[in-house]
Image: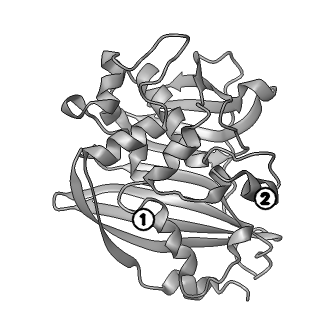
């Protein structure tokens, strides 16, 4: 059944209550590799890493917003009126996050989710699922997931914007490498994304991969952590917005090579798989900061 964009956009937002505490945050940070070894040095007791792993010093990496509460529940928007798609044809094409203020270590909030846009790319459709989260003190964050649905284009809708960021024609200001542990996808999925693509070798083969791949949102979180820890001096409260396009896959056991170009108010980032001739992993990636 073709997508009925007008019906999807007119549907009432889905409201839900979410909550989290220090255990959810610590689990998420561990799923990004917090506290693990780097360059042959254990970081388990490093003071900078304890901000991610020890409840008495805890701060919250803003990308935690992608798993807060029910994890990937925002993708329930794919069941919105006017949208009937085969989940086998669904890809997470990109993600953007706007922070209205720092995320508290313990929280209870209301999430309002809706289809914010539907674009016709010809052979595919792009559905933008927006979640707006607020607690008793006001708005916390706005999260947009750009969902690419193969074979669902051609319904006569707008093509939508094409966002491609040009990187500076100079060497990066920083290059960081972040190893992905062999079991990292197994740990990360405990934060809410249970897709067997990231754990079951047989399922991964059916999807066309030699072995399970890492979650795109895990690469997304690992990249933000590297930017915060280096370019932003470890201060998570400086992050104002963060967006990326998922350009390729990475496997557990590989290494993310994260190149950063610092400009006033933002850091431009390119992320590749170091062991595969710098194959693209994340593109058009920008961290806006105070």
Q: Secondary structure at mark 2?
A: loop
Q: Which residue is mark 2?
A: 207
Left or right: 98 as drawn, with respect to 106? right
Give the residue drawn at x 57%, y 43%.
185
Q: Secondary structure at mark 1?
A: strand
Front position among marks 1 and 2: 2
Q: Which residue is mark 1?
A: 131
Compare residues 82 and 34 and report the one nearer the observer: 34
Give the residue drawn at x 75%, y 45%.
211
| Residue that protrudes farthest toward the top in the picture | 40
Left or right: 201 as drawn, with respect to 103? right
Give the residue drawn at x 80%, y 49%.
209
Figure check: 206 above or below 218:
below
Compare residues 276 and 176 and report the one nearer the observer: 276
Q: Position of residue 191 (x, y in %)?
A: 44, 51
Considering the image in quadrants, where does the N terminus appear? Answer: bottom right
Callout 1 crowding tier (Cα within 10 Å): few <14, some 14–19, many ≥20? many
Q: Position of residue 268 (x, y in %)?
A: 57, 31
Figure check: 158 above or below 229:
below
């Amino acid at each position: 059944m073709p997508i009925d964009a007008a019906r999807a956009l007119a549907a009432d937002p889905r409201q839900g209550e979410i909550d989290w505490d220090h255990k959810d945050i610590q689990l998420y940070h561990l799923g990004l590799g917090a506290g693990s070894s780097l360059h042959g040095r254990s970081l388990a007791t490093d003071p900078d890493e304890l901000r991610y792993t020890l409840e008495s010093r805890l701060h919250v990496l803003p990308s935690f917003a992608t798993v807060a509460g029910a994890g990937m529940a925002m993708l329930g928007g794919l069941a919105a009126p006017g949208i009937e798609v085969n989940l086998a044809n669904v890809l997470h094409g990109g993600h953007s996050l706007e922070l209205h203020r720092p995320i508290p270590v313990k929280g209870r909030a209301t999430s309002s989710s809706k289809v914010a846009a539907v674009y016709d790319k010809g052979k595919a459709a792009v559905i933008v699922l927006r979640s707006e989260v607020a607690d008793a003190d006001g708005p916390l964050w706005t999260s947009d997931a750009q969902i690419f649905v193969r074979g669902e284009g051609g319904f006569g809708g707008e093509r939508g914007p094409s966002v491609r960021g040009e990187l500076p024609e100079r060497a990066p200001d920083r290059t960081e490498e972040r190893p992905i542990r062999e079991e990292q996808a197994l740990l990360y999925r405990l934060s809410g994304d249970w897709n067997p693509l990231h754990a079951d070798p047989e399922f991964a083969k059916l999807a066309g991969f030699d072995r399970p791949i890492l979650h795109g949102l895990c690469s997304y979180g690992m990249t933000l952590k590297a930017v915060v820890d280096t370019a932003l001096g470890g201060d998570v409260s400086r992050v104002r917005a963060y967006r990326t396009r998922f350009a390729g896959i990475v496997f557990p056991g590989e290494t993310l090579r994260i190149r950063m170009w610092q400009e006033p108010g933002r850091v431009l980032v390119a992320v590749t798989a170091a062991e595969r001739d710098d194959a693209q992993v994340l593109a058009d990636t920008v961290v806006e900061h105070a």
